Image: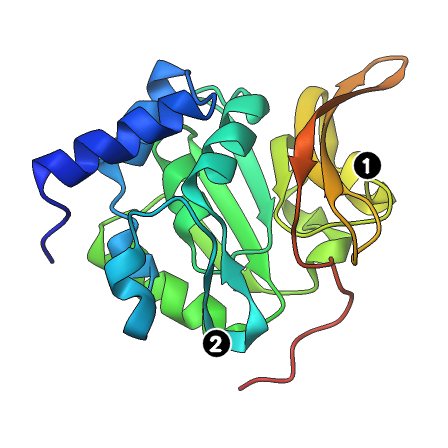
Amino acid sequence: MSGPDPETKMQFVFHLRSKGVTDAKVLAAMEEIDRGPFVRGIFAARAYEDMPLPIACGQTISQPSVVGIMTQALEVNPRDKVLEVGTGSGYQAAILSKLARRVYTVERHARLVREAQMVFQSMHLANITAMTVDGSFGLPEQAPFDRIIVTAAAEDPPGPLLAQLKIGGIMVVPVGQSDTVQTLIRVRRHEAGFEYDEIRPVRFVPLLEGLGKDG
């Protein structure tokens, strides 16, 4: 599975920098993980453009600059255990796998999990566990997590996810009504409570409860 040519890759990384992705480790991970295998069908040729693209089950693969900004905001350390809510194509989890010790990614659509697992295997990403579960409740059996990233928009940071964040942990989540532009929020958990800061406007599909109806 051949990746992009060096010129395309260089332009890709340069564009990420121009959009505010400046963390060297995040840029290195995004340079290493080829976005191509996560984009299928007629959109495969556009894998290196900075735009969201449709995937199965009515979902999207986020535009690379947003993936980079969210990953950078998460401040992942090499020993961290990370929970991702909303596997989608698997692209975000693959980036995280290069930065964290362990990545748990959960998704309500079984088909997306199966397809993402195939790409993870082809890339030999052995530190990712992908599961078909209702991500709005997190993954209590593996909690607490050092970092949590949510790739769907909630009206407020979900309580069950906040509860599964370690003291000193960070969660990045888009917050806002599903039919308008949302705000990307970073939540830090302290002994005394939670600290919130706004990062930038974004637009994501809504965080839904329950499992998808696909096979």
Number of marks = 2
Residue 26 can be seen, yes or no: no
Report the amino acid beneath label 1: Ala
Residue tagged 1: 163
Q: Nearer the viewer, residue 130 or 70?
A: 70
Query: Is residue 190 at all visible to an observer of this figure?
Result: yes
- Spot occupied by residue 46 in the image (x, y as percentages of width and height): 30, 57
Above or below residue 73? Residue 176 is: below
Between 6 and 167, the one nearer to me in the picture: 6
Across and down, in percent, residue 186 comes to: 71, 26
Name the amino acid, label 2.
Arg
Does 145 sit left or right of 18 as displayed? right
Q: CA distance from mark 2 to mark 1?
A: 28 Å
**Residue carrying label 2:** 111
First in sequence: mark 2 or mark 1? Answer: 2
Please provide percent x and percent y for residue 77: 47, 19
**What is the secondary structure assignment of the residue under circle 1?**
helix
SS of the residue under disc 2: helix
12 to 122, vertically: above or below: above
Residue 167: image quadrant is top right
Residue 85 at x, y percent in the picture: 62, 50
Q: What label does residue 15 carry, if any?
A: none
Given residues 125 and 18, the one toward you in this image is: 18
